[in-house]
Amino acid sequence: MMEARANGLQSCVMVIRILRDLCQRVPTWGPLNSWAMELMCEKVIASAGQHLSPGDALRRVFEALASGLLLPGSPGLLDPCEKDPIDAASPLSAQEREDITASAQHALRLIAFRQIHKVLGMDPIPPPKFQRGGRFTRKRRRDNSTGEGNDSEGELDGGDGKKDKKEDGEDSKMDMDKETK
């Protein structure tokens, strides 16, 4: 039954495969049984209400775990195949639940700091040889050395918000202003 529901969610199967690998590689995740993992992935991804990319789906599953989904006192993972309300993660001890929650929080931090390769257990992807766009490669010059400058100064003094150009012809105002108008 779960496979049929998970197949309808494109990213769910990929996230389940990643979590299975995580359960085999990382001892903290080992106690999480496959049924509880598949049930959790399907419920979390289906609750998004929209199609998620595999990366967004993985992040959403880690967010659910990091928020305490498995911790004692939480709603837990109700097994839809049981008549009585039974937690599908009931074989996990309280310590194992806390360890998985802490590990999911750590995984989210790694993902936020562009180190998902550590979560996936792979080598980092080499940086691109050529940067596309190059729009944000330079820093904006401050008007004064104390940093008290305000982006809206030009509007307050009756000006149009544009800054004078530098001597070499480079505009000192960021390109973002053009997009916001």
Image: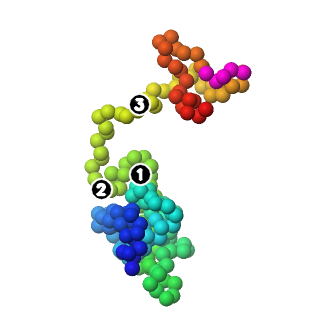
Q: What percent of the width, then of the height, locates residue 89?
A: 43, 76
From this viewpoint, which residue is outermost toward the bottom?
A: 83
Instruction: Assign the C terminus to one quadrant of the image.
Output: top right
Task: State if disc 3 and disc 1 touch (CB < 8 Å).
Answer: no
Q: What residue do we see at 33% from left, 52% from top?
A: 118
Q: Which numbered circle lies on residue 132?
A: none
Q: Earlier in the sequence, mark 1 or mark 3?
A: 1
Q: What percent of the width, then of the height, locates residue 42?
A: 43, 70
Please provide the residue range marked out in magenta.
158-162
Q: How many numbered discs, if any?
A: 3
Report the amino acid beneath label 1.
Ile
Q: What residue do we see at 35% from left, 33% from top?
A: 131
Q: What residue do we see at 69% from left, 25% from top?
A: 155
Instruction: Assign the N terminus to one quadrant of the image.
Output: bottom left
Element under disc 2? loop
Q: Nearer the viewer, residue 73 or 15?
A: 15
Closer to the camera: disc 1 or disc 3? Answer: 3
Task: State if disc 3 and disc 2 touch (CB < 8 Å).
Answer: no
Decide whether residue 98 is among the magenta residues: no
Q: What percent of the width, then of the height, locates residue 31?
A: 36, 73
Decide whether residue 159 is among the magenta residues: yes
Q: What percent of the width, then of the height, locates residue 137?
A: 43, 29
Tell me the residue that label 1 is attached to: 111
Tell me the residue that label 2 is attached to: 121
Tell me the residue that label 3 is attached to: 134
Q: Residues within 10 Å of mark 2 (few under 14, many from 20)?
A: few
Element under disc 3? loop
Q: Earlier in the sequence, mark 2 or mark 3?
A: 2
